[in-house]
Amino acid sequence: WQTERGLKLGSVYTYRRHLEAHFLPTFGDRPVGEVTALDLNAWLDALEESKGHTGAAQIHRVVAALFKWATGDAAELPRTFTPWLLTSPVPPLAARRLRRPNLPQRNRETLTDAELSALADLMPEADRLAVLLSGWCALRIGEVLALRRRHVTTDPDGTAWVRVESQVQARGSGVREESPKSDAGRREVPVPPVIAADLAAHLDTHAAPGPDGLLFPRVGGGNGLNNPNTVRKRFNAALKALNAHRAEAGENPVENFTWHGLRHTALTRLGQAGATTAELKAYAGHSDGKSVEVYQHAERRRLAALVQDV
């Protein structure tokens, strides 16, 4: 059903893996109507014990969607669809969350400009700009790796722009280029002056030749696509090295931080500069305002701190 309605291959692959690894081993041989809320509560307890609350929540969403389909309440089902169930037995996670202690969440910490620069410097030279583009322009890793020379333009006033038209994915069937998740993902983003020189130097040194030359081609692969997982491994090594330097200086480590935290850093910076919801949506490539509210919350906290000194 998800494939037929046009969901991205990578998302379908992830959903299938969640079900095959965590749900079907327990319930796969049981008729749908015999799976009870009591059974699912016990299953969720065991799942949270092994995967943690965040990991369990991702799998819970897939299972909840599966049973929502079975009740005939899912989007874009044909009118002739006959429901398998009257109601879904999947218990909501909201009440369960309230019974559990707050667990560390990823990417709640943002990097300072100096930390971002230091992290980029610890990457292989050919990947350095990728960190800066995510950390200053809020690009996802797949969007960064899909950039080609023709996507970089410069205004008469000297402002450089990068145009996002696609993304590189590796989930499901190997490395491939595909369209963004939504139309909002297609966008142009201005490059801050602080990294404009880094962009120009990278184009001169590391990008593949020609208009279709990738800015970050695979090492030794001509103009081949880079695997996001490979670049993430280099990033994790750089982050480990950064934390080692911070430990030597008696500073706290940057914890629970992934590549997506670079995007969070960039959008938080914009929120603190006073960006509106519409501006944050355009910059981030989000189609709804709820996804960017967190960055305006950061701005509210900053304003609250400022008035303490008035």
Image (cartoon, rainbow, N blue to C red):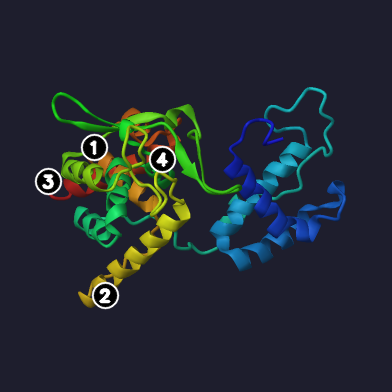
Which amino acid type is marked by label 4?
Ala
Q: Is residue 30 above or below residue 245?
A: above
The residue carrying mark 4 is 146
C-alpha span from label 1 to label 2: 32 Å
Closer to the N terminus: mark 2 or mark 3? Answer: 2
For the residues labelled 3 and 4, the Cα–Cα distance comes to 47 Å
CA distance separating discs 3 and 1: 34 Å
SS class, disc 3 = loop
> In the image, residue 301 lies at what x, y percent?
28, 47
* Earlier sequence position, callout 3 versus callout 4: 4
- Amino acid of disc 2: Ala
Q: Relative to residue 197, is residue 23 drawn left or right? A: right
51 vs 40, left or right, is left
Viewer-proximal residue among 197 and 31? 197
Label 2 packing within 10 angstroms: few (<14), some (14-19), many (20+): few
Disc 2, SS: helix
Q: Label 2 belongs to which residue?
A: 247
